[in-house]
Amino acid sequence: MLINCVAYEDGRKLADIPIDDIEEWVARPRCFVWVALRDATDDELRQLRHEFDLHELAIEDARHGHQRPKIEEYGDTLFVVMKLREARSDGLEMGEVAIFVGANFVLSVRNHSAHGFLGVRERCEREPEHLKQGSGFVLYALMDSVIDRYFPLIDAMDSDLEEIEGAIFDRGAARWNIQRLYALKRRATVLRHAVAPLLEVTGKLHGGRVPAVCAHSQEFFRDIEDHLARINTAVDAIRDTIATAIQVNLSMVTIEESETTKRLAAWAAIFAISTALAGIWGMNFEHMPELKWAWGYPMALNAIGGAAGFLFWRFKRAGWL
């Protein structure tokens, strides 16, 4: 579905144009066309491939989606794939955007995502001195918008991790904490898969040999790489903390199970001594003088109670009960 198709010249918007007129506008000097699609149809991609002379393999990637974040060059065209964080409660869902960038055009194809880039377009139009740099600055603005959406996810994971750490030593909370930690680890892994591959290839957009469309915007792409590095470092720190927290919680589970075992063992010992004494007096041998005593029965009960009480006191003092 076409979102918008706009022509720009010298950093200023000229007009909203139909797709059929793109060829006429891109032929003008100092002019470039910015097209945005969402869940594009095969016919739309086929038409834009013809208009911008896009590579067949890149179009296939944009059509099918589910690509690893990457930056590839096809002649004079740059092809960028990024993951879009969706506004879901668990933060796990990721959409995708494929961006084609040439000297006189930018084409973004959004898949499985409700996030739009209208705010990015408005930002670029408010900064004509930067938009004058052409399609390279638009690529930076799109990448910056996608990456900025990762920071709230980092903050949310930090908050969840702090909450879990605060409950680590709560009695009976270990198993629940481990479930939450594994869910958090999954979110961190999803984010890392979105950031790490992109960090590996962003360096080709600044310094040394860079694609022609990025030549005048290298300082902006350097900032992009810095943001990605910060996010990647934060994700690694979160993953390390999660691993440590999981080990601590597993240790707490073991400790709680050990305490339960000690309690059961203590009560078993108390009942064992009572059972042993009761068994002795229950044998009814003839030559057991206490069976003939008037106070024999109370004495036996007191002996059983005293032995059980002594064991209870000892186990209580040792922390088993």
Image (spheres, grey):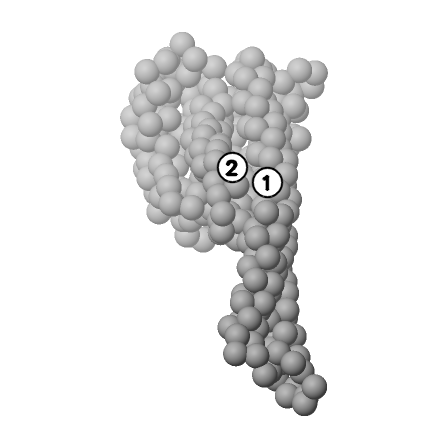
| Near-viewer residue (74 or 139) | 139
State left or right for residue 186 relative to residue 149.
right
State left or right for residue 24 relative to residue 210.
left
Residue type highlighted by circle 1? Ala
Residue placed under numbered mark 1 in the picture? 245
Marking on residue 220: none
Q: What distance separates the C-alpha of mark 1 from that of mark 2? A: 7 Å
Give coordinates of residue 111: x percent, y percent. 44, 46
Circle 1 residues within 10 Å: few <14, some 14–19, many ≥20: some
| Near-viewer residue (132 or 268) | 268
Question: Quadrant location of residue 229?
Answer: top right
Residue at image location 47% in from the left, 15% down from the top:
133
Give coordinates of residue 18: x percent, y percent. 32, 37
The answer to whether the residue labelled 1 contacts the one labelled 2, judged by CB atoms less than 8 Å apart, is: yes
| Near-viewer residue (13 or 285) | 285
Question: Quadrant location of residue 307?
Answer: bottom right
Q: Residue reaching furthest top?
A: 129
Residue placed under numbered mark 2 in the picture? 165
Give coordinates of residue 120: x percent, y percent. 37, 26
Residue at image location 60% in from the left, 31% down from the top:
237
Q: Can see residue 297?
A: no
Give coordinates of residue 299: x percent, y percent. 55, 71
| Near-viewer residue (306 or 194) | 306
Q: Secondary structure at mark 2?
A: helix
Q: Can see residue 270?
A: yes
Residue at image location 41% in from the left, 52% down from the top:
41
Q: Secondary structure at mark 1?
A: helix
Please state the total of marks drawn on the protein image: 2
